[in-house]
Image (tube, rainbow, N blue to C red):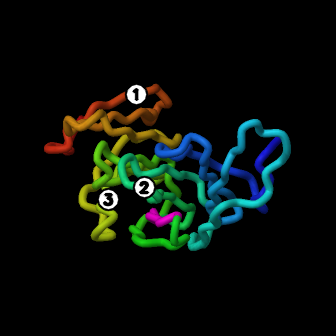
Amino acid sequence: PMIRGHAGVIMDFDFYPFNENLIITCSEDTTLRLWNIPEPLTEDITEPLAKLSGHSKKVNLVQFHPSAESIVASAGFEGTVRVWNVESQSSVFAIKGVTESFSSLEWNYNGSQILTASRDKTIRIGDPRTSTWVQEFKGHEGPKPQKAVWLGNEGYIATVGFSKTYAREMYLWNISNLSKP
């Protein structure tokens, strides 16, 4: 059995941290959809519990908030990160201003900030409550996509990417000084 409700390819998914039977997907069709996975799963699922629309281009990343129920973040190819309330099926915050697509999206430990990496080689930290990017810094110089993750609640970020000569790199960043890894 499969999830068959999107009109395009599913790009990413995340399981709901408060109910193991719920999963959210995002797709090339510009939507996010929330699904209930029954036990046992015996047939295709075609009707979502919720459908979230608001991105203008395909949505490639999605992640549930780590501590707030019904809150999810998504990143689209139009350069916008949206924060959604799944219960009301509405976008509650949007952080715009990026010209390239995102390759990484992650909430911090307590869910107060969002970390992204994009194809313009920039790592950004956003505050969804103010809909602004609060910090930006250049990551890896190579042309391939990079990933960024928070390291617990200690004020560090790890990134993986490539150098200009395609050598694999991993950097550790202190968020109090992002001028160099």
The residue singled out by tag 2 in the image is: 69
Q: What is the secondary structure assignment of the residue under circle 3?
A: strand
Q: Quadrant of the C terminus?
A: top left
Q: Earlier in the sequence, mark 2 or mark 3?
A: 2
Say left or right for 156 vs 76. left
Badge number at residue 126: 3
Q: Main secondary structure of the magenta part?
A: strand
Q: Residues within 10 Å of mark 2 (few under 14, many from 20)?
A: some
User: Quarter of the image holding residue 7?
Assistant: bottom right
- In the rendered image, the quadrant that contains the N terminus is top right
* Residue under the image location 51 percent in, 58 percent down: 75
Q: Which residue is mark 1?
A: 169
Q: Which residues are magenta?
A: 80-86
From the viewer's perspective, tell me whether residue 27 is left or right of residue 146.
right
Q: Earlier in the sequence, mark 1 or mark 3?
A: 3
Does any portion of residue 156 appear in the rendered image? yes
